[in-house]
Amino acid sequence: MQITDTPALIGLVRARADLLGLRREDIDLLAELADGHAGKLLAPVPSSGLGLKLVWGLVESVGIKLVAIEDPDAMARIRQFIGTRDEKQVRKVNMRSAARIKKKARLERLFGDPRYFNKLARKGGIACAKSLTPQQRRMAASRAANARWKRVREQRRRARNAPTHTPQTDLQESKP
């Protein structure tokens, strides 16, 4: 069976579930969906949208897997674009920063405005400072200042060690 759009995929999952005699509640359990969600997704006129995360759970819950094959018609349409990507302009992904961005986006979805976290952090910092002795506060401030100045010292050291002369070959070529 060829799947070309979301309704066709939902129809396939619905037909497979009916063939196997699976109740919608069982699909909820197998696909780790909220109670009643499979019924909304697999209804003849779905009352809920099918997100990408739900696809994999639904497909797996009815015991099938999706197989990707090359479509000759689609390849004919995209042939003019193949090989046009400039690798120099591709952003290299640092997995730690990608995970951090993903976590930040998830938190923003959960809690809304990111300024909420700034307020929360400020309250936590004030509460923490109140619980410290004056000597502990001085030590924390000293560590923070050292961390800030460490970056400045590192930049200055790199600037001092950077080569300031031009290579000899460049000088010879520039003389008339």
Image (cartoon, grey):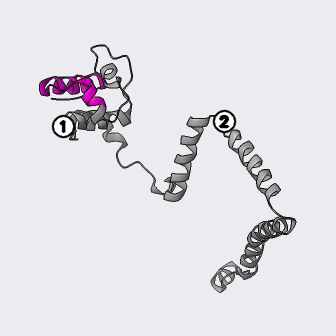
Can residue 24 be seen here? The reply is yes
Q: Is residue 57 magenta?
A: no
Q: Outermost residue toward the right?
A: 134
Which region shows up in magenta? Answer: 1-28
Q: Which residue is mark 1?
A: 64
Q: Is residue 170 left or right of residue 106?
A: right
174 lies above or below 65: below
Q: Quadrant of residue 146?
A: bottom right
Residue 4 visible to the viewer: no
**In the structure shown, which secondary structural element does the residue marked by tag 2 occupy?**
loop
Kindly state the secondary structure of the residue where label 1 is placed.
Answer: loop
Residue at the image point whose x is 24% and y is 38% from the top? 60
Residue lying farthest to the bottom in this orientation: 168
Q: Nearer the viewer, residue 89 or 64?
A: 64
Q: Which amino acid is tagged 2?
A: Asp
Percent coordinates x, y for residue 100 in the rendering? 55, 52
Give the residue number, with chain letter if any, for mark 2: 113
Within 10 angstroms of label 1, few (less than 14), some, or many (20 or more) residues? few
Q: Earlier in the sequence, mark 2 or mark 1?
A: 1
Q: Is residue 106 above or below residue 2?
A: below
| Lateral position of residue 133 relative to residue 106, left or right | right
Seen from the viewer's position, the closer of residues 129 and 56 is: 129
